[in-house]
Every structure is written in C-alpha cells, then in structure tokens.
C-alpha cells in the first residue's frame, strides 16, 4: 500500500462569526500520494485556496486533521508548521513570488538556505535543479529579466530543490500563455512521475486535465467529485514531457 | 555563505531614497550624541586644566572649595605648619581670583588672576610662545593667552602695557591654547602681584601645592594633614580633578544638560531608523511572507531584519565618525573643545548598534504577525 504524503481528514474551516460567518470548507477528505499529480478544480470562491493553505500547513483547520508524511499538524505552533513546510512541502505560487533583488540561482538557493544548507553543495544542487527546468543559462539573471514562463520555472526549481515530498502549486499557469502553461504542467508532471513527489495543482483551467492523474472537484467548500483521468489524453502529456530536459 | 546578508543588503539598497533617509537619521543622531558627549569630555578636561598642569603631590584647599576657581581662602600661616610635617618637602601657595583688566578705550573687562611662585615652578603657564615664564617673577608682569588678544584689547604681545584694577601691568609672556571654560581670560602672575590685583591680603591664600619627599607615603601624609588641621581638604591631583568635574558637570547642571541632549538624540535617532526599517519591512511584506511560506523559521527572518539594521548602523556610524573627526579638528582651538576619545568612539559604535537593533523591534513584530497564506491570495 502506498503511504499518503498529505492526508486531509474531515477538514472544515470557518471564517468569521455571527452574520459574517463563512464556511469555507466542509468535511473535506483528500489524500495526496507520491508519484501522482492531482488537479484541484473549482470555480472562484469554491475553497480551493483555503484547502491549499490548510494542506500546505499555512492555515489551521477549524475541524479535522492534516497529516503530512504521517505527522499530524493539529495544534502545531506557527514555527512548528514552518518546520513541517520546510521539511516536506514545496510551493509554487501563481504570482511566482520571487525576490526581485536576488538572482535566479540565489532565489532557488534560498529554499536550501532556510533549511541551513549552504556552501558548494547547495550551489551544485541549485545548478542541477535549474538545469532540470532548462534555465542553465539564466543563473545570474534577475527575475525582472525573465519571461513569465521562465519565472514560473524558477519558482518550480525553488519548490523542488530541497526535495520535499509534496509540491503544492497554486494556479501555476494562470499568468502564462497556453504554450508556457503546458510546459509548466509538463515539468510538474515530470516531478511527480520521475521524482515520485505528490503534486497538487490548483486550477480552473480544463486544459490541464491531460496532465492529471487525478482530478478533484470542489464547490462551495465541499469536494463534489474525484476522478482518474481519461487515458486518451495521456499521449499528449507524454509527448510534452518527452520534450523537456531530463535530470 | 548564507543568503541572509545578501537578502538584507539588497533589500536595504533597493530603495536608495529610503536608505539615505535612514542613514541621515542615524548620522544626525550619532553626530549629535558625539558632539554632546565630546562637549562633556571637553568640558570635563577644561575644568581641570589648571590641576592637570600643576606639579603637586597634594592640593590643600579650604574645606568648602569645590574646584580650582573656588574663591574660598586659607590662612597663609598654615604653610609653615604644613612644611613642618614629616614627608613634606615643599609648600607653594597659589592665589586665584577675579579682577578687572583695562581696555585701550578705558573700559574694563573681567579676568581670572592666577598667582603662584614661579621660582618653585609648581603652577606655571604652559605653551609659552612669546616671552618667558621667568619674566613673571618681576612685579607687575603677567602672562596671557593669545586667543584673548581681542577680548583684552591687546595687539602687540610681549611688552604691551595696560592696567589691572588700576595698577600698571606689562605683558611678559604669551601662551597658546590656555582657554578658560568660564570665558573669563586667565592672567598668570607672581604671588605678590596677584594679591594686589585681587585685593587679597598676604595673610590669605587660595590653595597650597605640596611636593612630598621622595618615597613618602602620599595617603599616610594626606591623612596626617586631615587629622592635624581643621577646615581644610587635602586632595591628590586625581581627587581634586574628580571633585572639580563633579562640581562643574553635575552640581551646576551643565553635564546633565549635555546628557539630556545626548539622550534625546538617541531617542530621535531610534525613532527615525525604526520608522524607516518598519516601512521597508512593510514594503517587503510579501517577500517575508514568501520566506515564511517556504519554511523559513522566525529566527531566519529576524536575522534578515537585524542584518539590515546592522548594515544601517555600520554605514551610518562610519559617516558620523568622519563628521565627528572633522568637528574635533575644527573645534580644536575653540573655547570649548569637543574631545572624542577612542573609548568614546567604541561606546558610540556600540550605542549605534543597540539603537539600530532596538529600531528593528517594530519591524520584527510586524513580520511575526504576517500570515504566510497571503502569498496565495495575491
């Protein structure tokens, strides 16, 4: 049996109280396993970001439990949650959130730096992971000198450089054109398949279905459907993945 | 090498205008503290200048005398009794007091007369640039500092004649740099002339300077003197310096005013740097939230902010120190010197570091409260 990387059990989340009370999530159960790319689909305001925040140990659920690599995040203090994120989770954000004053290599190395990994080993690891996303020639560039697609690749490199068990990507293709969006999804799919990571992509773009192993639908804070992808779309995905530089 | 320094320095230098504003705050504050403390030390040095330049093992003063310029008096007859004590080699009287110096236009200006026995040489004018100290043994001959030429209406230096308290006076020596913190010029002369200018009878004296025999036990003799004579103080030069400084700096309130100024400068500097760091942190809030989201610990983030504060401190202090050195240079010949010692520099650097770190507290408190999830909503 495959051990789940992130497991959400009966998660609920309420914001506010009284007349302003909003139930963002209701009894959500979700399991992310290694080697699998899951796409979380849903309209705006459906609770996607709240669920991602809870799965990423940035936000505590009002009820229910999140287990990351077997360890429960329930009752953890902010610094303990940061430690869970540091040890097990890599994030890719819609707005990239790269540091404009740091070079591409430094932005990626930052993820190792916060884990107290410094020196030549960290530099070598950074260069290796940037090569895997096709950015060897951009090591010394600053984010402002890169295209959106390249910036998102840097963000992915930062998310995976410390080899976390799970990668959580929040609308990673929303700011990109179709070609760059497909390329980014191909990279994330490779990470899931070749590195055996659990990858969760939050999106409302149906064009990403082809990369998903599992699609989870959320609406009004509840998971409404969970399905495995149609095998007919896999060849398209595999063709794109095949075109990527390999590790 | 950790990226903490890289991140901090680039955050800091990214907005040059804000960085310059922070530096101005630090420099302004540090220079103000430096000047206030420099004045304090300069004042402290100036008020003991006569004690510093006298060669005595012990000072005998009236019990109520607080400092060299104190006008309390001793009976001159005490001299022979002091001289008769075991271990005492020489007792030299010193007379001090205010008098009136006649200006060429007939007006008069106050002067502070210092009379001593120049043959004994216990308290003679120093830095003599014209004339000789020996000439002062002649009645009616005085030494003045050339920085007071204007005040005293003197244009010709040695040989110039005028009157003190209506009595004829000839300048026999000119010094360079003997400034009075009271702004009243010092006039050195022999004992008899000084008594005459001050209007002090021969039976009274301001202080006695005691030279002890070689190998004499200073403390033992000091105690003997104190137990043998009532109404006097017997002080080592160090004790007299300390007493003088304590009087001028604290009993008169002058030192307290300087300290208060320095304290205000520190508060103003801390507020300026704190405000700048806080606004810089607010501008980089998404950056700090990203750091938190990718798992940076609180201590990592503190290091970034404190590193920014330390960079502010080091660069700000370096500029302030250069300004301080220039101020010291330009005030070297002024009435009230600004004295900046090496220890003061070190202490000011530490103060600057502490000030900048304290300034970082508000920024740290802001970052601690930042929700890493905000990076998902932007």
Image: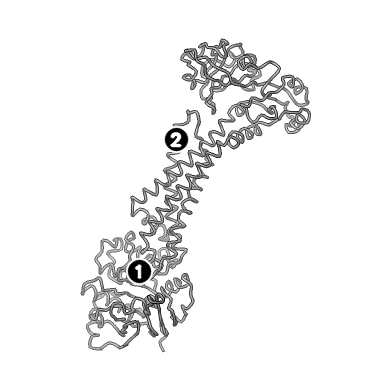
Pick the front one: B59 or A229: B59
Task: Relative to B166, say whether A239 is above or below.
Answer: below
Q: Secondary structure at mark 1?
A: helix
Residue B46 in picture, x, y percent from top left: 55, 30
Picture quadrant of residue A124: bottom left
| Crowd band around label 1 with a 10 angstrom C-alpha radius: few (<14), some (14–19), many (20+) | many
Pick the front one: B10 or A130: B10
The chain ID associated with circle 1 is B
Report how far apart the C-alphas of labels 2 and 1 lie in the structure.
50 Å
Picture quadrant of residue A26: bottom left
The residue tagged 2 is B327
Residue A47 shown left or right of residue B155 in the figure: left
Residue A66 shown left or right of residue A217 in the figure: right
Residue B249 shown left or right of residue A119 in the figure: right
Give the residue displayed 75% in from the left and 30% down from the top: B226
Q: Earlier in the sequence, mark 2 or mark 1?
A: 2
Residue B318 shown left or right of residue B229 in the figure: left
Picture quadrant of residue A58: bottom left
Pick the front one: A2 or B252: B252
Circles 2 and 1 on the same chain: yes
Pick the front one: B256 or B9: B256
User: Could you tell me which quadrant the N terminus of chain B lies in?
Assistant: bottom left
Rendered image coloring scheme: one colour
Residue A166 in picture, x, y percent from top left: 38, 77
Task: Relative to A31, say whether B133 is above or below.
Answer: above
User: Could you tell me which quadrant the C terminus of chain B lies in?
Assistant: bottom left
Residue A185 in picture, x, y percent from top left: 27, 77
Task: Relative to A33, say whether B66 is above or below.
Answer: above
Give the residue displayed 43% in from the left and 79% down from the top: A62
The residue tagged 1 is B375
The chain ID associated with circle 2 is B
């Amino acid at each position: 049996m495959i051990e789940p990387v992130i497991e959400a059990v009966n998660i609920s989340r309420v914001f506010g109280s009284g007349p302003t009370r909003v139930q963002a999530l209701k009894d959500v159960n979700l399991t992310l396993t290694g080697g699998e790319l899951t796409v979380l689909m849903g309209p705006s305001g459906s609770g996607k970001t709240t669920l991602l925040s809870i799965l990423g140990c940035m936000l505590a659920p009002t009820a229910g439990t999140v287990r990351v690599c077997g360890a429960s995040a329930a009752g953890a203090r902010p610094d303990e949650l940061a430690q869970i994120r540091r040890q097990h989770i890599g994030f890719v954000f819609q707005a990239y959130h790269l540091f404009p004053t740091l070079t591409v290599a430094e932005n990626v190395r930052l993820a190792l730096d916060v884990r107290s990994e410094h020196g030549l080993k960290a530099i070598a690891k950074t260069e290796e992971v940037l090569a895997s996303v096709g950015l060897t020639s951009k090591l010394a560039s600053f984010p402002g000198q890169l295209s959106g697609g390249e910036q998102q690749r840097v963000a992915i490199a930062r998310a995976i450089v410390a080899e976390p068990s799970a990668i959580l990507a929040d609308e990673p293709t929303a700011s990109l054109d179709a070609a760059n969006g497909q390329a980014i999804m191909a990279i994330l799919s490779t990470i899931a398949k070749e590195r055996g990571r659990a990858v969760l992509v939050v999106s409302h773009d149906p064009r990403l279905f082809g990369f998903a192993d599992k699609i989870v639908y959320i609406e009004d804070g509840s998971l409404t459907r969970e399905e495995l992808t149609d095998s007919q779309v896999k060849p398209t995905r595999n063709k794109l993945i095949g075109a990527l530089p390999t590790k | 090498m950790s990226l903490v320094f890289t991140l901090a320095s680039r955050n800091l230098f990214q907005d040059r205008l804000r960085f310059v504003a922070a530096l101005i705050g630090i420099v302004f504050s540090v220079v103000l503290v430096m000047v206030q403390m420099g004045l304090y030390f300069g004042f402290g040095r100036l008020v003991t200048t006569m004690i510093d330049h006298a060669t005595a093992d012990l000072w005998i003063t009236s019990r109520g005398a607080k400092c060299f310029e104190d006008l309390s008096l001793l009976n001159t007859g005490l001299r022979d009794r002091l001289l008769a004590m075991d271990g005492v080699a020489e007792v030299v009287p010193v007379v001090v007091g205010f008098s009136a110096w006649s200006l060429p236009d007939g007006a008069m200006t106050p002067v502070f007369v210092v009379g001593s026995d120049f043959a004994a040489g216990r308290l003679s004018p120093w830095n003599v640039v014209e004339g000789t100290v020996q000439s002062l043994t002649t009645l009616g001959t005085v030494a003045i500092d050339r920085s007071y030429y204007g005040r005293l209406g003197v244009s010709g230096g040695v040989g110039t004649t005028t009157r003190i308290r209506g009595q004829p006076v000839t300048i026999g020596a000119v010094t360079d740099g003997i400034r009075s913190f009271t702004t009243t010029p010092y006039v050195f002369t022999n004992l008899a002339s000084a008594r005459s200018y001050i209007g002090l009878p021969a039976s009274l004296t301001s202080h006695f300077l005691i030279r002890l025999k070689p190998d004499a036990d200073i403390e033992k003799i000091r105690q003997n003197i104190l137990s043998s004579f009532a109404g006097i103080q017997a002080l080592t030069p160090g004790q007299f310096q300390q007493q003088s400084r304590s009087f001028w700096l604290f009993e008169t309130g002058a030192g307290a005013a300087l300290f208060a100024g320095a304290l205000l400068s520190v508060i103003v500097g801390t507020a300026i740097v704190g405000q700048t760091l806080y606004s810089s942190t607010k501008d980089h809030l998404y950056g700090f939230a990203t750091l938190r989201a990718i798992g940076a610990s609180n201590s990592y983030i503190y290091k970034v902010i404190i590193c920014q504060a330390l960079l502010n401190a080091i660069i700000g202090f370096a500029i302030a120190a250069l300004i301080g050195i220039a101020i010291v240079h330009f005030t070297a010949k002024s009435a009230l010197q600004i004295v900046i010692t090496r220890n003061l520099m070190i202490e000011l650097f530490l103060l600057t570091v502490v000030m900048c770190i304290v300034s970082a507290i508000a920024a740290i408190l802001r970052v601690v409260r930042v929700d890493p999830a905000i990076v998902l909503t932007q």
